[in-house]
Amino acid sequence: SSLAPQPPPRPPPAEVPPATVQAVVKELRGLTSSRLEAESLPELAVTLPDESNVLRWRVEMSVPAGCALRDEVEAHAAAFHVRATVELEVSFGADFPSSPPFLRVVAPRFPFHT
């Protein structure tokens, strides 16, 4: 993981319908089983920063070859001695899957892009 400052944990929404939790768990299991069985996502890691809150994920992913961002991420990683990955925080709301999750880029932070 990079040296990016970690945000304070966000509490889960006060009222979360069981169907929302089930939908999020299904997504998480789908990513996990796809990666384990077929290794179709070898450059993607999903973790739960707080095991008691399945609505908040931490995602670390490599930038695909041929993507314009890859060179910038690799240069940043070399300059700051961190992994050449993009870290995201994914937060699911109580109305998921009707509404998409919120994505926040945790790292890298490029001053000219923020």
Image (tube, helix red, strand yellow):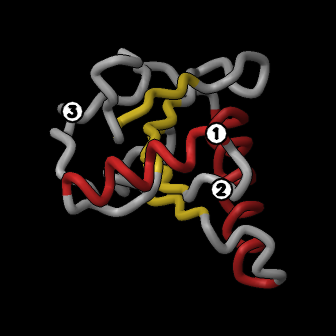
Q: Position of residue 94 (x, y in %)?
A: 58, 21
Q: Position of residue 104 (x, y in %)?
A: 45, 27
Q: Amino acid at mark 2?
A: Leu
For the residues marked 3 and 1, what is the alpha-carbon distance in whole angstroms? 28 Å
Q: Residue at x 29, y 60 (%)?
A: 78
Q: Which residue is mark 3?
A: 7
Q: Which residue is mark 2?
A: 28
Q: Amino acid at mark 1?
A: Ala
Lower position in the chain sequence, tag 2 or tag 3: 3
Lower position in the chain sequence, tag 3 or tag 1: 3
Tag 1 secondary structure: helix
Q: Which residue is mark 1?
A: 68
Query: Which numbered mark, 3 or 1, is in the foreground of this view?
Result: 1
Nearer to me, 71 or 106: 71
Tag 3 secondary structure: loop
Among the 4 quarters of the image, the one containing residue 74:
bottom left
Query: Which numbered mark, 2 or 3, is in the foreground of this view?
Result: 3
Nearer to me, 89 or 48: 89
Q: Residues within 10 Å of mark 2 (few under 14, many from 20)?
A: some
